[in-house]
Amino acid sequence: MDRIRIPLTASVVLLVGSLFAGTSTRGAEASPPPVRAPEAALSTGILLDRVVSLADVGTRDGSAGSAPAGFDAWRQILHEMRRASLEEPGWPSLETIRARQRAAGPNTILLGVLHLEYERIRDAAWADGAAGVRDGAIVLSDPTAVSRHRLFAVAPMEERTYRGAEVSFRIPRDLVLTNDREPITEIAIDFGDGLGFRPVALDRAVTVRYAGPGEKTIQVRARAGNGLVLHATTRLNVLRLQTPTPDDTLSITAMIPYQGEAGTGEAYVYLADTHAELTDPILIPEGFDLDNTLDWDDYYALLNEQELLETFRDAGHDIVLLDFTDATTYIQRNAFVFLELIERVRALIDPATDVAVAGPSMGGLIARYTLAYREANGYETNERIFLSFDAPQRGANIPLGIQYWIAFFADQSAEAAAFLEALDSPASRQMLLTHHTDPPEAVPTADPLRGALLADLAAIGDYPTAMRKVTIANGSGSGLDQGYAAGTQIIEWEYESFLIDVTGNCWAVPDGPETVIFHGLIDPIFLPAEEQTVAVSGTWPYDNAPGGWRDSMTDMDEVEAPYGDIVALQANHGFIPSISALALDVDDPFFDIAGDPDLLARTPFDAVYFPVENQEHAAITPENKQWILDEVLRAPADVAGGGSIGARIPRLHAVFPNPASGAAEIRFDLPAAGPVRLSLFDPAGRRVAVLQDRSGEAGTHRLVWDGVDAGGRAIAPGVYFLRLDTETGSHARKLIRR
């Protein structure tokens, strides 16, 4: 399964700024140059030469060999065509398009179509004087200075699905963006499901069923009014054939506003098999969703690594996942959304039930604020454990050199501009240990919003105290770095040509002395060069320090840059320093965690977990999964005494098949050797059959049940419950006979 990244996790696609654009300020977009030309010269209304085309538009001309276009390429083309238009084309914004895809739900994928004509200046026109640049404008003296071209590109507005067994595709009429004089009259699509091409009507859904996961090639064939046949290719990544559907979705609006605005979100409720209603929940606030596109399917895939969520459900816990409407807004605002969710859940369950709270990544910081606020303001608390999972309790890190690189090259790239917007969002500025500034600071600091958040936390007690608090780091506790030294170059990008020179080099921050961390250059032949060099000193070496890592540099390396080649000289950078995830009262990110004889005295948490080697941020491993289970599933008496980890509970696996009309396979795990009784009960609680009643060894056991009761008679169709009883606990699971 491809990992879905939660905090600050979109890939960093770095692209060059506009050939004619001025220097941007904190991502402000410069306007393309005006055009002075004879009226007959630009009949399409789009002159692509107003921008530097980064999407290689010419390779997507509708011919049979056209290059494929994924969503990122489609978005970049739309961005370029909008900016290259002489007048605002009136197309829906990208934000509107993505909002419509979110509203369509996980079972529907919208397809966007770009069917455009545009013009480009002929190469010879620059040489013979028919085209030139004067006073900041493109001047065309002859209509023949330009040539007409066609663009045809189709892409899904969501490139992945976890519901490949049955997914619908739809082309909304208003997502066919066109200025072509010959409108499309017919569309046929081969969805890569083995059924070949089939006709597709605008605004009509087509249901597609894939036999297995994997990347699917989607081919589009369209016919224009003049008979011209157009071709386009795109892809869809089928990550899973099916994802469990939540049993309920709660709409949550915070009762307490922050900065004059109340946050909102949706809470997905996924009940244990043995529960008909919310009974014993684990509450999970989401982390940083860079463009607010992640939903239940994404988070289920992430949090169910190593079958963690399903193991909790097998143990009788319900999952309640809070998806914020805007995960990039102020942490305090979303903390009040989580506060309201806790109150809603408390009203739905037995007041005596103690709930668990688990916060992955930024969700751990939000949960900390919420729980501390509840205690400080006299709320009745029933949270028995707070688990923080690789959360930036003492800050997060994105290499400062990469931050400046994004800002420098953000003018022309839709992806870079979106990343810069997220980088400058309130939540990002609150979490990052150092944040880019304009002009750059010689000694980098955090954004003022971070100081305000820390002050707010201090005012409410900093951390909750009325529950057990445990934390997990994905970063090394043994002082292992990310494989390179402080100040090492991490990105190399240098390109030279007759028309333009481009440089975009980055270095890891130094361990104290002044070091250049970014050098950027855009030097077009027609205009003065734009250049920026950033040098800093007095920094802690967070980029190469122990911590849960992100592979931002590797992502950058995989981008096909329009000029030259972006080379990642190092693979990963530290994202959540180990000392931050463990909330240690030290500043040195290379602090000897494993060697500290009194580590718990340095953290507000009651128990900590860290691996020997650095792991990917928010990765669930077999080792930390078991640590989580031992903490969350331990008995309340064990928690109160702060003693050793409680004995592991027995586990019944899912019955197969279920429902079953004939024999069914039943598997179960025993944590230790001892007596075992496996019984079948009807909904009234009457024991129908005893399937096993003897001693068993530790490990996994398997038996096949033929569907008969204690007297050897076939049981009637209906709902039943299996219960596994051992000396260390019990586990039940629903079984359906038909």
Image: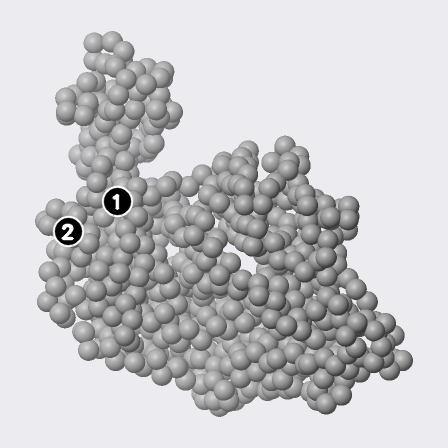
Residue lying at 64% horizontally and 41% vertically, measured from the top left: 189
The spot of residue 726 in percent (x, y) is: 20, 32
Indicate whether 32 appears above or below 249.
below
Residue lying at 57% horizontally and 82% vertically, measured from the top left: 24
- CA neighbours of label 2 inside 10 A, class few (<14), some (14 to 19), many (20+): few
**Marks 2 and 1 close (CB-CB < 8 Å):** no
Callout 2 amino acid: Ala
- The residues bearing labels 2 and 1 have C-alpha atoms spaced at a distance of 15 Å
Q: Is residue 542 left or right of residue 188?
A: left
The residue indicated by pointer 1 is 318
The spot of residue 722 in percent (x, y) is: 24, 27
Indicate whether 351 appears above or below 386.
above
Comparing 530 with 652, the one in front is: 530
The spot of residue 60 in percent (x, y) is: 72, 56
* SS for dot 1: strand
**Figure quadrant of residue 435:** bottom left
Q: Which mark is drawn over residue 556? A: none
- CA neighbours of label 1 inside 10 A, class few (<14), some (14 to 19), many (20+): many
Residue lying at 23% horizontally and 57% vertically, measured from the top left: 341
Q: Among all residues in the image, which is located at the extreme front? A: 39
Indicate whether 583 appears above or below 136.
above
Comparing 446 with 42, the one in front is: 42
The residue indicated by pointer 2 is 347
Q: Is residue 47 left or right of residue 665?
A: right
Q: Earlier in the sequence, mark 2 or mark 1?
A: 1
* Residue 130 shows in the view: yes
* Eye-nearest disc, 2 or 1: 2
> Which corner quadrant holds the C terminus?
top left
Q: Is residue 670 left or right of residue 97?
A: left
Callout 1 amino acid: Asp
